[in-house]
Amino acid sequence: MITRKKIIYPVNESLRRYLRLYQREQKLPVTYNQLRDFLETIPVIDARGKDTLWETVLYPQEQQNEINNGLKKIYAMLKAGGDEKVQRHLYIERIDFCTFGNTHPFRIKIVNSYNDVHDYFYVKIADASRVYGLELEHILSPNQLNYLVHENTLVEEHIAGIPGDVFLPLYNGRPEFNPKRIGKEFVKFNERCFVRLLGDMRAYNFVFDITPDFDDFQFRIRAIDFDQQFFEGSLKIYLPQYFKENFPYVDMALKHFNKDVMMQYQQEERALIARRIKEERYRLRDLRDILVNDEISTTEKIKQLGFELAEYYEDAVFERCTSMGELIDRSLKRVLVTTHVKQSNM
């Protein structure tokens, strides 16, 4: 069971040194606390008249101008290496505040005045769990991520795609979309989450990135919520297949694949992760050295997850781990060892 209100863990000094080393920490012209100082809000209603649980925030005029200019600078830092020339034709159309979720994010809509093309980015509380999740996603998944941290503020780029809970009613059954490809990607996504212990990947916490190919459509599932990076104690939290919201995707895989095919896709994903671990071994080592000493969960949850992973893998080392950092380190080492053994036996 997922903890209703996850603890927000601060970014400690060791993690900050890591973030500075890899150019993730920079001084920001606008902080999360400044954005919280709004005067009033207006509910954001979707096209069907439903309350989205987002609220557009309003500031005093003199404060609004300062915030807008600062947010444009942040966007330039996030997307263009801080080049201020890109700011000249940009303007902030809207700042929305989310009334649910652990980090109560702000969503910034920024528009190019030359062509009206818009983009989004997010300003959130800098939760260490989320920072670790973003960093592991960047290193171990097929997806690269831009984010910045300063004091208690975290800035993230928008991850484009169709939310998993919206995807099915909109696209399921369309003849041009191959359900086998969708099922295959869900199997691989399930494996990615489990290996790096990313939890709570219910359908509304991931999106579909759809790419037309010369003879078919390709699908990639991308996580968009990293609050539950190795926090909970139950092993099932880290396997998207167990959430009822994802059952249609599980059924899609079960309908089209037998056990051998699923194992093939799982091993393909583990082989790709193993390759990324080797390519980024020094960066992962730096991150591991911080993780093993950081308090990012409770003793009870660490013990529970260690016991369940030891039982699942038949590997007693998991049960002896005393931190979430040690658990993720063991999980990644297993990927390297088992992939090497399987390749050697081919």
Image: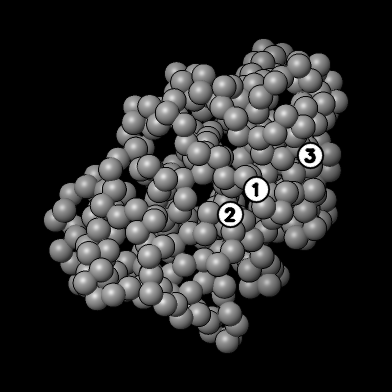
Tell me where residue 299 appears, x and y as whole percent.
72, 29
Q: Quadrant of residue 13?
A: top left
Q: Is residue 237 above or below residue 35?
A: above
Look at the image and tell me whether residue 133 can be seen.
no
Residue pointed to by mark 3? 234
Mark earlier in primary sequence (3, 1): 1
Q: Is residue 49 above or below residue 206?
A: below
- Left/right of residue 212 with respect to residue 324 in the rendered view: left
At 73% from the left edge and 49% from the top edge, which residue is drawn? 3
Asked if the residues shown at circle 3 and circle 1 are in contact, with their CB atoms under 8 angstroms apart, the answer is no
**CA distance for labels 1 and 2:** 7 Å
At 45% from the left edge and 53% from the top edge, which residue is drawn? 124
Q: Quadrant of residue 66?
A: bottom left
From the image, state whether disc 3 or disc 2 is nearer to you: 2
* Crowd tier of the residue under label 2, counting other residues whose Cα lies within 10 Å: few below 14, some 14–19, many 20 or above: some
Color scheme of the displayed model: one colour
Residue pointed to by mark 1? 6
* Crowd tier of the residue under label 1, counting other residues whose Cα lies within 10 Å: few below 14, some 14–19, many 20 or above: some
Asked if the residues shown at circle 3 and circle 2 are in contact, with their CB atoms under 8 angstroms apart, the answer is no
Look at the image and tell me whether residue 336 can be seen.
yes
**CA distance for labels 3 and 1:** 14 Å
- Left/right of residue 280 with respect to residue 72 in the rendered view: right
Three-letter code for the amino acid on which mark 3 is drawn: Ser
Mark earlier in primary sequence (1, 2): 1
Three-letter code for the amino acid on which mark 1 is drawn: Lys
Three-letter code for the amino acid on which mark 2 is drawn: Asn
Q: Is residue 151 above or below residue 35?
A: above
Tell me where residue 330 appears, x and y as whole percent.
67, 20
Query: What label sits on residue 211 in the rendered view?
Result: none
- Left/right of residue 345 with respect to residue 134 in the rendered view: right
Query: What label sits on residue 102 in the rendered view?
Result: 2
